[in-house]
Image (cartoon, helix red, strand yellow):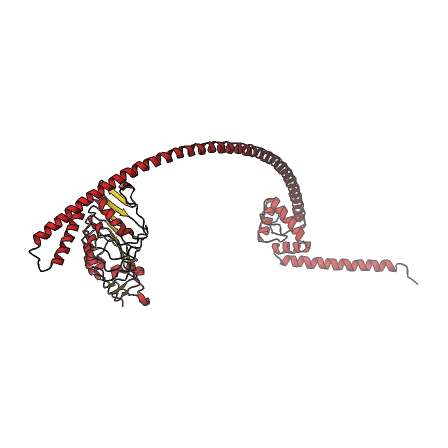
């Protein structure tokens, strides 16, 4: 049987026990707080709040809104955020701990939520403005597309008009061109008839001139023959023991005297067949003015230049060309000439350029070529020439370019070539030259290019010529010459 008042006594007992425990816990807390620093107590108080990263992020937004934090709202109270919290507590006039309590948490959460709402409102406003701009851009693009389409149509219309106009113009041009062609044909027919009449008259005059020339030459031959006979009679007593030689010398002297009296025109006409051979075609005729003769350049009555490069000349070089005493340029390169180089060419004292390359000339290089004091260019390469390089070529004081490559000349390089103070190009590659490179070549101070490759040279390269080493090496057989003093 339950005793009356027993439940009440038990309740009062439990209440007393709880009160005693609470008082004891409070006393323990007070005792513990008395041993902690204010900052440690604030940290413990913040820890008891159990703040999540989303709440801390709102606190950081609140600090940013109050102007005390410039970092990211990442949900972590880093030292920079703690510093901002201390500044905020200072502004509020509360205890500066750098940690949150319930009051500061409430205020900062409110400020953070307000900043979040403002940011969201700004975002929505920006999105609305962006949408407005997008729609405006779409309208602009559509308007520009309409204008572009209109421009395209206008351009197509103008292009069609231009095409029609062009077709009309071409048709008119074709009509005018046809009329002009018919007129030109009429004029050409008239000119042809006039030219035929002129040529007929010219042929008549040329025939008369030819007959007159033949008569003159016959008279000169008769006089020469008479002179020969007279000369033969005068010296008959002196050479009775050798009449054949006497007659030959007399004939040769008469021939030379006859040629000395020939004009430049007559000399070229006499040399034409020898020079052209069976393959060349030279239009040198009395019926043509000398100004129209192939490759002939004149100054007054004198021939000063012959430029017959690449004319398929298949003959020989006539010695008569040496009678062109005013000749300054002789270019016979790139033909099929055979025979030797006439030594008589050395008498051309005014010659500045002699081009005989790319032929089939044989024999030796005449030493007489060294007498041409005004010669600047001597080109004999790509010919099967033999013998040696004449030392006399060292007398060509005006020579600037000497090209003797790809022949069959042999022997040593004459040291006399070192006297050519004006020489800029010396090409001797592809021959059979032997011996050492003359040290005198280092005296060629104007030299810009030197080629001695593919010969049989030995020894070393003088140091001043090492700048041309790539044009000197290698020699035949792959031999490379070293610099003198470094063997």
* Mark count: 0
Task: Name the image quarter holding residue 49.
Answer: bottom right
Extreme-right residue of the structure:
1
Q: Is residue 94 left or right of residue 1?
A: left
Residue 39 image position (x, y, % from top left):
61, 54
Which residue does the image show at 30% across and 56% down from the upper left?
A: 359
The correct choice, above or below, for 23 with respect to 282 in the image is below
Residue 374 image position (x, y, % from top left):
20, 49
Residue 278: tell me if it is visible.
yes
The correct choice, above or below, for 143 with respect to 77 in the image is above
Please name whichever residue, 277 or 330, is drawn nearer the observer in this view of the structure. Answer: 277
Please name whichever residue, 145 or 263, is drawn nearer the observer in this view of the structure. Answer: 263
Residue 331: tell me if it is visible.
no
- The quarter in which the N terminus is drawn is bottom right
Residue 394 image position (x, y, % from top left):
19, 56
The correct choice, above or below, for 238 with respect to 285 in the image is below
Residue 273 image position (x, y, % from top left):
27, 50
- The quarter in which the C terminus is drawn is bottom left
Q: Is residue 96 left or right of residue 174?
A: right
Q: Is residue 453 left or right of residue 62?
A: left
Which residue does the image show at 22% across and 45% down from the upper left?
A: 266
Task: Name the image quarter holding residue 244.
Answer: bottom left
Which residue does the image show at 74% across and 58% down from the upper left?
A: 22
Please name whichever residue, 427 or 194, is drawn nearer the observer in this view of the structure. Answer: 194
């Amino acid at each position: 049987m339950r005793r009356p008042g027993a439940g009440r006594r038990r309740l009062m007992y439990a209440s007393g026990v709880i009160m005693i425990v609470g008082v004891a816990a409070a006393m323990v807390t007070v005792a513990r707080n008395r041993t902690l620093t204010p900052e440690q107590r604030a940290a413990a108080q913040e820890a008891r709040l159990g703040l999540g990263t989303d709440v801390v992020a709102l606190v950081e937004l609140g600090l940013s809104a109050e102007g005390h934090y410039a970092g990211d709202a990442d949900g972590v109270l880093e030292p920079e955020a703690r510093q901002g919290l201390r500044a905020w507590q200072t502004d509020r006039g509360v205890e500066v701990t750098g940690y949150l309590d319930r009051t500061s948490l409430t205020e900062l959460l409110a400020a953070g939520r307000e900043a979040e709402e403002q940011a969201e409102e700004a975002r929505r406003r920006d999105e609305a403005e962006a949408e407005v701009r997008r729609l405006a851009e779409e309208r602009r693009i559509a308007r520009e597309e309409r204008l572009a389409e209109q421009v395209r149509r206008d351009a197509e219309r103008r292009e069609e008009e231009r095409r029609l106009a062009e077709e009309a113009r071409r048709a008119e041009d074709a009509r005018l061109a046809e009329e002009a062609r018919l007129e030109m044909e009429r004029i050409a027919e008239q000119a042809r008839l006039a030219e035929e009449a002129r040529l007929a008259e010219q042929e008549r005059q040329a025939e008369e001139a030819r007959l007159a020339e033949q008569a003159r030459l016959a008279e000169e031959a008769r006089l020469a023959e008479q002179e020969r006979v007279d000369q033969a009679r005068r010296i008959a007593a002196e050479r009775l023991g050798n009449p054949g030689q006497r007659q030959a010398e007399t004939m040769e002297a008469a021939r030379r005297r006859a040629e000395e009296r020939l004009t430049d025109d007559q000399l070229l006409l006499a040399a034409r067949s020898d020079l052209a051979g069976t393959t060349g075609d030279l239009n040198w005729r009395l019926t043509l003015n000398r100004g129209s003769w192939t490759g002939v350049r004149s100054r007054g009555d004198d021939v000063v230049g012959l430029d017959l490069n690449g004319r398929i000349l298949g003959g020989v070089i006539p010695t008569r060309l040496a009678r062109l005493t005013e000749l300054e340029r002789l270019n016979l390169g790139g033909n099929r000439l055979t025979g030797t180089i006439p030594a008589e060419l050395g008498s051309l004292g005014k010659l500045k350029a002699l081009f005989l390359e790319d032929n089939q000339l044989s024999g030796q290089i005449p030493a007489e070529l060294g007498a041409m004091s005004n010669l600047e260019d001597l080109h004999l390469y790509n010919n099967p020439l033999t013998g040696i390089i004449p030392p006399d070529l060292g007398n060509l004081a005006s020579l600037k370019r000497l090209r003797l490559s790809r022949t069959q000349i042999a022997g040593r390089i004459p040291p006399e070539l070192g006297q050519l103070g004006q020489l800029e190009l010396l090409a001797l590659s592809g021959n059979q030259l032997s011996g050492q490179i003359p040290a005198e070549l280092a005296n060629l101070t104007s030299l810009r290019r030197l080629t001695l490759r593919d010969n049989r040279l030995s020894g070393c390269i003088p140091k001043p010529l090492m700048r041309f080493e790539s044009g000197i090496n290698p020699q035949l057989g792959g031999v490379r010459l070293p610099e003198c003093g470094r063997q």
